[in-house]
Amino acid sequence: MTKVGTTVVRVDAPAPAVRLPRRRGIELSLIVLAVLLSVYGYCDVGLAKNGSIPPGAAGYGAGLGVLALLAHIAVRLRAPDADPLLLPIGVLLNGLGLVLIYRLDLETPGDRAAPTQLVWSTLGVALFIVVVLLLRDHRVLTRYAYVCVAAAMVLLILPIFFPAVNGARIWIRIAGFSIQPGEFAKVLLAVFFAAYLAANRNALAYAGRRIWRLQLPTGRVLGPIVAVWLLSVGVLILERDLGTSLLFFGLFVVLLYVATGRTGWIAVGLLLAALGAVAVGWLEPHVHSRVEDWLHPFASIEAGQGPNQLAQSLFAFAAGGVLGTGLGLGHSVLIGFAVKSDFILATAGEELGLAGLAAIFLLYALLVERGYRAGFALRDPFGRLLAVGLASIVALQVFVIAGGVTGLIPLTGMAMPFLAQGGSSVVTNWAIVALLIRVSDSARSQYDGRQAP
Amino acid sequence: MTRHIRHSAFFCALLLVALFVNATRIQVFQAASYDENPANRRHTIARYGQPRGDILVGGLPVTGSRDTGEQLRYERTYEDGPLYAPVTGYASQEYGTALLEHSEDSVLSGADPMLSPFPLWNDFTRSQNAGGDVATTLDRAAQQAAYDGLDGRKGAVAAIEPSTGRILALVSTPSYDPAALSGNDSAVGRSWTRLNGDADKPMLNRAVRKTYPPGSTFKVVTAAAALDAGVVKDVDQRTDSPAPYRLPGTTTRLTNESDGCENLSLREAFKWSCNTVFAKLGVRVGVRNMTATAQAFGFNDTALRIPFSVAQSTFDTSVDKAQLALSSIGQYNTRATPLQMAMVSAAVANGGQVRQPYLVERTTRAGGSTVETAGARPLRQAMHPATAARLRELMTEVVTDGTGTNAAIRGATVGGKTGTAQHGLGNSGTPYAWFVSWAQDHRDMEAKVAVAVVVEDAEADRGEISGGGDAAPIARAVMEAVLKSAGGRGR
C-alpha cells in the first residue's frame, strides 16, 4: 500500500520551483510535419494509381491543417502545459487513416468512405476542442461518475433494439448515419471505473484469504468485478461483440490492479476471463468459428473454398515484406468486406511494409506512453487512474485488433484507433486524446521538480 | 500506486513486443511461404497487370493484349488465330498456357530476370519488367500457303530451312482461335469444354504432337541406310527382290500398289515406290544399321524441343525380320511426326546433315534490344554426303517423272517422295496421304526449304498412291512461297 492516495493536492498550488518548458512551438512544428506527411501520402497514392496528383490534395491538406491548427490553438489557450506529443500523434494517425481509406476507395468506386471519414474527423476534432475548452479540471468528472455509467449502460443496450449487421448487434442507424454506441461507452466507463476505484480503492484492497502467494480479495468486495464481468459477457452474448467485451474487462482488471495493487485481482480476473472465454467459445458459434479460423487460417483453402479474410490478411502482410509495395500498389482489397475498417492495418502492412507497420505501432506506443507518463506525474488518484485507463484503452484496442488481423490472437471486430473507417471510433479517440491533454496539462503544471511519488 | 502503474505499463510494452515479433514472423520469416500459396492471387494479378509481350512473325506481331479494366487486367488477343495457333498456342487466364506461349512464358510475361536492365534491379525496386517479344522463324507466306492448301481438311504441314533448321511453316488443321480461351469468364469455360470435346481435336498440334505411320516416305531412310551400309553399291544395279515378297518366317505375302517391281534397281524402285524391294532391303540392312540411320535422322529422340516439346517419332528396335521388313516401309511400329519427316527431307537436301529445328529466332526486351538469339543449332550427320547426293537424284526423279510430278516448280530443282499410310484395324481407316520434299532454286547454292505434308482424310481409293495427288500440291505451294520470299530477300 502506497501513501499516494493520502496526498492532498491543492488546486491553487504555489508556483512550482522548476517550471517545465511548455514546448507549444514543438507541438506546432510536429503538427505541420504530420499534416505534410499525410498530404504526401495522399499525393503518393494518386501518383501510384493514376500517375497524377489527386485534384483534392490541396483541399484535403488545407482541411486537415485547419482542423489541427484549431485544436492547437485550443490547447494553447486552455492547456498550455499539456504534453506536446499527444496532439501531433492524433493528427498523424488520423491523416494516415484518411490516406489509407482514400487509397482503398480507389479500388471500390461504388463505395467511397473517405469523405464521410473526413466529416467524422471534423466532428472528432470539434469534440476535442470543446472538451479542452470547457473541461477546466479533470476532477470535475468524478461528480458525474454515476451519470457516466448510466449513459454507458444505455449506449450499450441501445443497439440490441436495432437489427444485426454482419453478425454483430453493435450499430444503431439514425438518419443514414451508422453509430457504434459501444465506442462512446468506452470513455464513459473509463471515467466511471477511475472515479469508483479512486473512491473505494482502500476498501477493495482489504486482504482476504491467502492461497500460496496469492492474496485473494474478500468476498464482500468481489461484487463489483463480478458485475463488470457479467456486463462484458452480456455484451458478448447479446451483441456478439467479442472485442468490446474483451476491452471492457481488460480495462477493469488493469485499473483494479493499479488502484489496489492486489495480484489477487489479476488472478480472479484471469480466471473469470478464461471461464467466460471457454464457455462462450464453446456455446456461441460466431465466436467458435473465429477461434477455429485463428487456429487454422488456411482451412478454407484446403477445403477448396478459397482463402478467408484472415488468410487474405496474412497474404497482404506477407506481400508487404520489410519495405512494402508502396502506397497504392498493393492488393489488400482482396480481403473484401471490412478492408477499410477492421482490416485497415493489412493495407498499411502491405503497402508500407514491416517498416511502416512498426512506425505505426510506435506511434500508438508513444501515445500510450504519454498517457502513462501523465499518470505517473499526477498526484490525485482519479487523475492517475483516468490517465492509465485511457492509455490502456488505446493499448488494449491496438493489441486486440492488430493481433487479430496478424493471426496472433483470434480475430475480433474492433476499430484500429484513428486509422480505421468508423465515425464513432474517430470521435471517441479524439475525446480520449482531449482527456489525455487535460490530465497531462494538470500533471505538468503541478510538476515541482521532484519525481512523482 | 506508482509501482503498479509501472507494472501495467510494462504489460503494455509486452503487448507491443508481441505485436512486433508476430509482424516480423509474418512479414519476414513466413512471407515467402504465404507469397507462394496457390490461393494468393497476387502473382496472378501482377502477371496480368501489364500487356503481355508479343509473338512476331516476319517482324510483325501476330498477338496482342487487350485492357479489360478487370482485376486481371490484360487479356491475350490474336491476329489470324487459327493460322498461327499451332505455333503460338494459347495464353489463358483460366487454363494456363500452351506451346510458344508456354515455353516462352517467362519472356512474354516479363518474369525472365534477363529482361531486367541491371542484375537484381527488380528485387530491389519491386518493379516488374515489361513483357519481351519473341521473334519466330516462320515465313508468313509459307504458313499461309500451307494453311490454304490444307483448306480445312485434317492434316499438318511442317517446313524447315535445311541448312539452319529454322522452321518456316508449322500448320495443323482443323485449327481454333486461341483468343476464345484468353479471358476468365464463362464463355471461356464453354469454349474450353467445346474444344476439348471436339472429335476433330482442333487443339492438337498435328505437325509436332501427333505421330503418323510414315508409309512410303520412310523409304528415304531405308534407302539411306542401304547405301550407307553398303548393301546397295550402285543405285542402278538390279536387286534380287521377288514380288510379291514373302515376309521372312511368315506366310504373309507383301504386294505392291503397282506392277513390275520385281528385281527393280533402287532408282526405279524408289521412283515407283516398290514395297517389296524396300522391305527386303530393310531386312538385308539389318536392325542395327536401320536403327542407327533412323536415329541419326531423329527417330526415337525424346528430348527434341523447338522450344516446346515434340512427340517422339519411333522406329522399333526389337523386331523380328518380318516386323523389320514392315518397319522399313514405314509400317508396323514406325511412326513419325510431320516435322520429323521434314527433317528427313532436309537432311537429303543438306548433304546428309540434320540441323535441330527451332522456332524462336530471338527474344527481345520491350524496347527492342536483344535478350537471346537462336545461334547455331546442333548438327548431326545422318548419312554420308555421297549417299545424300544419290538420294537427291532419286528424290528429284520422283518429281520429274515419278509419283510426285504435282510438286514440280519451274526454275527450281525439287526432290520429293510420296507416301500413303494405311492404318486402323485391318487397314480399314482412311489412309494418310504423305508428301515429303525439298526445293532449290536454280540460282541458289543450296536448298532453301524442306517440307512434309500429311493429309488425314485423303479422298482416295486405298489401292492408289494418293500422296502425289493430295499432299504434293500443298508442298509445292509452300515451297514456292518460300523460294519467292527467299528470292525477294536474297537478291
Image (spheres, rainbow, N blue to C red):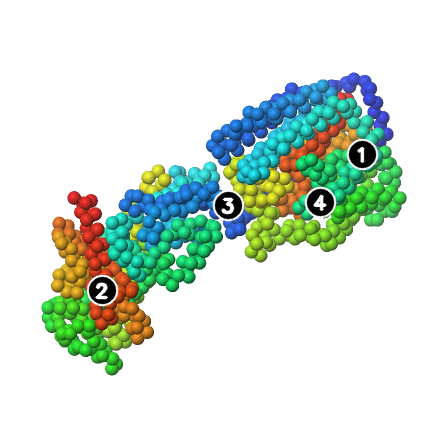
Tag 4 and tag 3 share a subunit:
no
Q: In the image, residue B384 lies at what x, y percent?
A: 18, 61
Instruction: Identify the residue position indicated by label 3 in the image.
Output: B42
At mark 2, the secondary structure is helix
CA–CA distance in space, label 4 to label 1: 26 Å
Question: A360 left or right of B428?
Answer: right
Instruction: Identify the residue position indicated by label 1 in the image.
Output: A148
Tag 2 and tag 4 share a subunit:
no
At mark 4, the secondary structure is loop
Q: What residue sits 68% from the left and 23% below the top?
A: A71
Q: What residue sits 73% from the left and 25% below the top?
A: A130
Q: Does the CB distance between marks 2 and 1 fall below 8 Å?
A: no
Instruction: Identify the residue position indicated by label 4 in the image.
Output: A163
Residue type at mark 4?
A: Pro
Q: What residue sits 41% from the left and 43% below the top?
A: B66
Question: In front: A342, or B236?
Answer: A342
Query: Tag 1: Cα neighbours inside 10 Å, few (<14), some, or many (≥20)?
Result: many
Q: In the image, residue B167 lies at what x, y percent?
A: 27, 53
Instruction: Identify the residue position indicated by label 2 in the image.
Output: B467
Quadrant including the C terminus of chain A: top right
Is A444 situated above or below B323?
above
Residue type at mark 2?
A: Gly
CA–CA distance in space, label 2 to label 1: 99 Å
